[in-house]
Image (cartoon, rainbow, N blue to C red):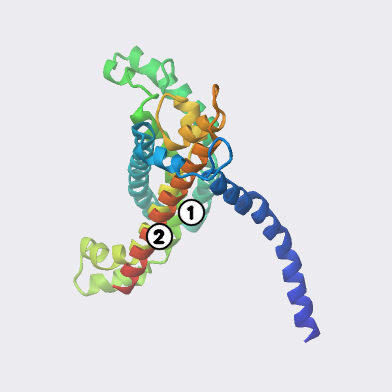
Amino acid sequence: MFKNKKSLLFIVQALVPFVVITLLFLLLPSILMMIDSFKNGSGGFTLENYKTSLTNMFYLKAITNSIGISLISSLIGLVIALICAYSISNFSEKVQNSIITILNMTSNYTGVPLAFGYILLLGNTGIFVLLFKHFGLNSLSNFNIYSWVGLIITYVYFQIPLAIMILYPSFLGIEKEWRQSAMLLGANSFKFWTKIGIPVLLPSIVGTLSILFANAMGAYATAYALVGRNYNLLTIRIGSLVVGDIMPQPDLAGALAVILGITTISMMMINEKMSKYIKRG
């Protein structure tokens, strides 16, 4: 009994730093942000910030742009990651470990360094653009990285490693014996994946999509470093309102941040419901 109490005390003490950090750096700022979103310039209570966020076409466009780029980059990244994860699962264990190690490193290559890397490669005087011009590939040399397509390409880049690392264990969970048994019963590779493989992977695929969507919705540094304030994204608008050059509007920024959080959480809840429904089916 004494040993159990001592173990319990050790666990509680070990959790204290985590709880304190969570309260100070996650819950407290979130609560203060939500409180500020209901304030007006004089500190009184108002819903005007939310009314402006949901009726002003400028901010509505920022919301729709962020949702659009998040969905597109998540779907593209998911498709590529499915192919890559399946391919990696067919290598030897040693090669798999090496690839996963590389993926762990590339998944951290985001933000300003990622944007700077793409500018060096595909900017107006980027390496590939100069090569395209040298070889007379004018259609490719006119590519504009500071555009909607450029943003999607950069977003897809940091989505792929994350998606692969999430999906890769799911492919390892598909036993080789299942495929062999299906082949013995007369099923070809297409039937195996449509009847067994994909249904088994579907909950993981849906869950991965929600994580990728949340990852893209919250991206700020990459987009800002690449296009600055020239493209209307929700995170960029929030940043502009917090550190406005003329008149900062932190209350309106708080309302937009709450909308961003609600959108992300709603998407994750929808995907969670879909995953449970798929598992029951």
Give the answer, above or below, for where 138 lies relative to 280. Answer: above
The spot of residue 196 in percent (x, y) is: 28, 68
Residue ID for mark 2: 269
Residue 182 shown left or right of residue 129 in the figure: left
Q: Tag 2, which secondary structure?
A: helix
Q: Quadrant of residue 67?
A: top left
Q: Position of residue 262 (x, y in %)?
A: 44, 51
Q: Is residue 28 above or below residue 190?
A: above
* Name of the residue lying farthest toward the bottom: 1
For residue 96, the mark is 1
Left or right placement of residue 281 versus residue 121 in this view: left
**Amino acid type assigned to the residue bearing label 2 in the image:** Met
Q: Quadrant of residue 17?
A: bottom right
Q: Amino acid at mark 1?
A: Gln
Query: What residue is rendered at 48% in x and 22% in y?
Result: 120
Q: Is residue 1 above or below residue 40?
A: below
Q: Nearer the viewer, residue 223 or 256?
A: 256
User: Residue 277: x and y, percent?
Assistant: 32, 69
Q: Is residue 185 visible?
A: yes
Query: Which x, y percent locates residue 168?
Result: 43, 57
Q: Residues within 10 Å of mark 2 (few under 14, many from 20)?
A: some
Q: Report if residue 208 is visible in the image.
A: no
Left or right of 13: which side holds 161?
Answer: left
Q: Residue at x 64, y 55 (%)?
A: 22
Assign the C terminus to one quadrant of the image: bottom left
